[in-house]
Image (cartoon, rainbow, N blue to C red):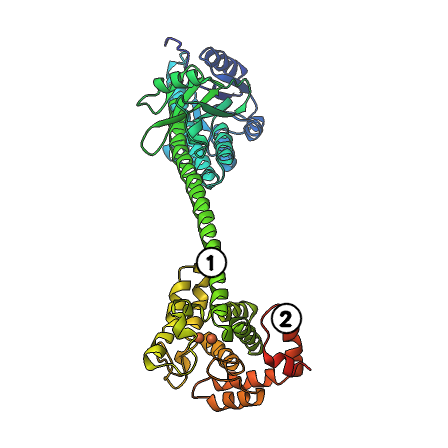
Amino acid sequence: MRQHKKIINDDAYSILTLDDDPIITSTIQAYFQRSGYRVDVENDPYQAIERIRQGNYDILLLDFLMTPICGDQVVERIRQFNRDIFIILLTGHKDMVPPIQTIRTLDIQGYYEKNDRFDQLELLVESCAKSIRQLRTIRSYKDGLSSIMDSMPAIHSLSAMDRITDSILHTASSLLPCLNAVLTLDNSYYHPLKGTSEMRTFTSRAVGQNFIAPTSQEVEDRLLLLQKKSSFVQDNQILLPIVDRSELQVGLFSMTLKEPPKHDQIQLMEIFIHQTSSALSNARLHTLLQDTNSQLNAAYHQLQSSYLEMISTMRKIVDTKDPYTRGHSDRVSYYAFKLAQRLGKDSEYCERIRVAGLFHDIGKLSIPDEVLTKPGRLTDAEFQIIKTHPKNGAELLSVITLFQPMIPAILGHHERLDGRGYPNALVGDAIPEEARIVAVADTFDAMTSNRQYRKALSFQQALDELEHSRGTQLDADMVETFCRMVQEHEFWVKMRVDMSDCAPTQMISERAH
Ligand SMILES: [Fe+2]
Ligand SMILES: [Fe+2]
């Protein structure tokens, strides 16, 4: 008789043995139990079918010739709901074996001619157990891989380190049956913004029971064990290194399992921790990047607000440099804003126009005072200098991103529809709409303000002039809308309130009464 050999396996395989002869079933049960299998017996074919339906058996050993139904009929019924169980058919005589076709169709793994020795049968059962073990390994590996895949979005989510480490621990503890899982990371890696100290210190996060946070020395010792290794197993514990992009050890992952890990489980954890390392590395870079970004943003906002402050001061200087143009930008801004509203523009557009109006002449900063405030007519050369102000203004403001949308209005506010304007002599619709709006407002305010070389026109004269410039200098529709607007008494009443703290225009006192 074959020497009984204790089968070394992870979980005992369960066998159901079915024969209408109780002596046979109890003999088989005794024999296989000694080999480490878990064996149940059944002498009624119908009951056996039900037990397989309810229970969790790996192997069925059944007699072929039975009453009231034969073994092949039993198998046929079982196969309708269970394709996984391994089946070995026991026959009394070789002539009684069912045809090979039936054996194939019913997916019967083997048959055994009964005799007083069970070693042949034991070989068959061992071969089934081996296949079952392989199938189980493949299945658990596949399940593990799909759990890893499922966990990837959370782990790679670039959220806070704490959340990522929690996701990692949660996934790891669902991959293998474990008592605890501990993720330990170098503090300078875990908190990349806190700076580094000479001695490495570590932070551990864990799930499960019986967990003691390792000391820094213990972590260093374990990392030494993991030098150039992707895992280290000691009894029920598995250790895996966490490495950064340059393969430097930045932490470790340890798991205390319920039993010593199998080869495929170690492999699975290696795959998972490799993924984890790269997710942590990404999250760390993301944190660093976010911090650099927020520092940059803060610096940028600081820069922007101080530049804005400077530009606003300069704008006031421009207005005060020439007493004749005092309040001009404020009024142009107001007229242009109101005109944009009348033209049905949305609030964002109107706001853009308001700011463009305020800064439209900022380029005059670079024009010498003697030219800017010269009484009387300008020479051609002096006028050429004046003509540089839209371009200078656009350049000055282009430094601030915030002003980018206003540049077209500022650059184009002295363009004319007939192409005789400056700086680019644009024609008609080629002049940006915002510039055309500011141009109407600018022209009206220039005409209705006293200048060093002439007195302000009356309201009616200004309207006539605007009318006259329709289609040649200014946009005809815009002029029409503007004239209608400023002819309303309420417009001036409102302007007096709205601009109470700005240099007034003669127009307000004339028209608001
Ligand atoms: Fe101007
Ligand atoms: Fe102007």
The answer to which of 360 and 480 lies nearer the viewer is 360
Q: Nearer the viewer, mark 2 or mark 1?
A: 1
Decide if residue 223 is in sight here: yes
Q: Position of residue 36 (x, y in %)?
A: 46, 13
The label shown at residue 498 is 2
User: Considering the image in quadrants, where does the C terminus appear?
Assistant: bottom right
| Mark 1 Cα-neighbour bin, 10 Å: few <14, some 14–19, many ≥20 | few
The answer to which of 2 and 269 lies nearer the viewer is 269
Q: Secondary structure at mark 1?
A: helix
Q: Residue at x 54, y 82 (%)?
A: 448
**Quarter containing ligand 1?**
bottom left
- Are the residues at dot 2 and dot 1 in contact (C-beta closer than 8 Å)? no
Q: Residue at x 49, y 54 (%)?
A: 305
Q: Is residue 332 left or right of residue 146?
A: right
**Residue under circle 1?**
310
The answer to which of 190 and 326 lies nearer the viewer is 326
Q: Of the residues shown, which amino acid type is indicated by label 1?
A: Met
Q: Is residue 480 left or right of residue 493?
A: left
Q: CA distance from mark 2 to mark 1?
A: 25 Å
Q: Position of residue 386 (x, y in %)?
A: 38, 75
Q: Residue at x 43, y 74 (%)?
A: 373
| Mark 2 Cα-neighbour bin, 10 Å: few <14, some 14–19, many ≥20 | few
